[in-house]
Image (cartoon, rainbow, N blue to C red):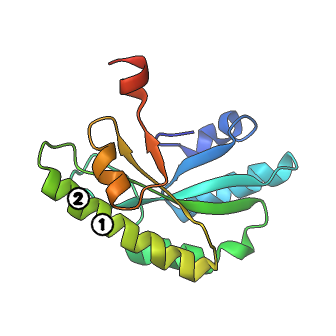
Amino acid sequence: FIGHLQTNKVKNVVPYAALIQSIDSEHLLKAVNDYAARIGKVQDILLEVFVASETTKQGLSEAEAVDLAERIQQYQNVRLRGVMAMATFTDDMDRVRREFSNAASIAAKVAAAAGIENLEISMGMTSDYEVAVQCGSTMVRIGTAIFGAR
């Protein structure tokens, strides 16, 4: 699942999602964990980190992401697989590169805090995936390239 997830919609997503890429608060993390426990599932998740300059983007700060990663073991029904980030929607690839580099740096800190090797880094969409891969992305979201514009 990719996209902003409201806590009241968790029950509609957790039974079907292999991976939720947009955990952007501890409140949402707890809701996902609790619902996954109710249905006997361990839900794979990515922490969404905020690196863009757009106020329309969601995500945890670096400090919040590291703090949650340090305490992730207290949530028995979620499994932290990595981080997700979205860069500013712009043609300025230098700016995008800085934001993705920042996300990769945060990902390394999250991995260390949680004791995770081979952390997934989901960043890069159709317009900027090449820069994302250069900055360490292990997962790109290129729906527009595959399916066309909405």
Residue under label 2, please give it: 97
21 and 139: which is toward the camera: 139
Name the residue rendered at 85%, 45% in the picture: 39
- Determine which of the numbered discs, if any, sits on residue 53 in the image: none
Instruction: Report how many numbered discs are placed on residues in the image.
Output: 2
**Residue 89 in picture, x, y percent from top left:** 21, 43
Q: Amino acid at mark 2?
A: Arg
Residue farthest to the left, as pictured: 92
Q: Are marks 1 and 2 in contact (CB under 8 Å)?
A: yes
Tell me the quarter of the picture where residue 33 sits: bottom right
Asked whether the viewer can see residue 28, the reply is no
Q: Is 116 displayed left or right of 39 in the figure?
A: left
**Residue 146 in picture, x, y percent from top left:** 42, 23
72 and 26: which is toward the camera: 72
Residue farthest to the right, as pictured: 40
**Residue 129 in picture, x, y percent from top left:** 33, 44
Tell me the quarter of the picture where residue 145 sits: top left
Up/down of 121 relative to 92, above or below: below
Q: Is 93 displayed left or right of 110 in the figure?
A: left
Q: Secondary structure at mark 2?
A: helix
Up/down of 133 relative to 113, above or below: above
- Determine which of the numbered discs, if any, sits on residue 101 in the image: 1
Tell me the quarter of the picture where residue 72 sits: bottom right
Q: Is 71 displayed left or right of 67 in the figure?
A: right
Q: Amino acid at mark 1?
A: Ser
Q: Which quadrant does the N terminus fall into?
A: top right
Count residues near mark 2 (Cα–Cα under 10 Å), then give few for <14, some for 14-19, many for 20+.
Answer: some
* CA distance separating discs 1 and 2: 6 Å
Q: Is 125 displayed left or right of 38 in the figure?
A: left
Count residues near mark 1 (Cα–Cα under 10 Å), then give few for <14, some for 14-19, many for 20+.
Answer: some
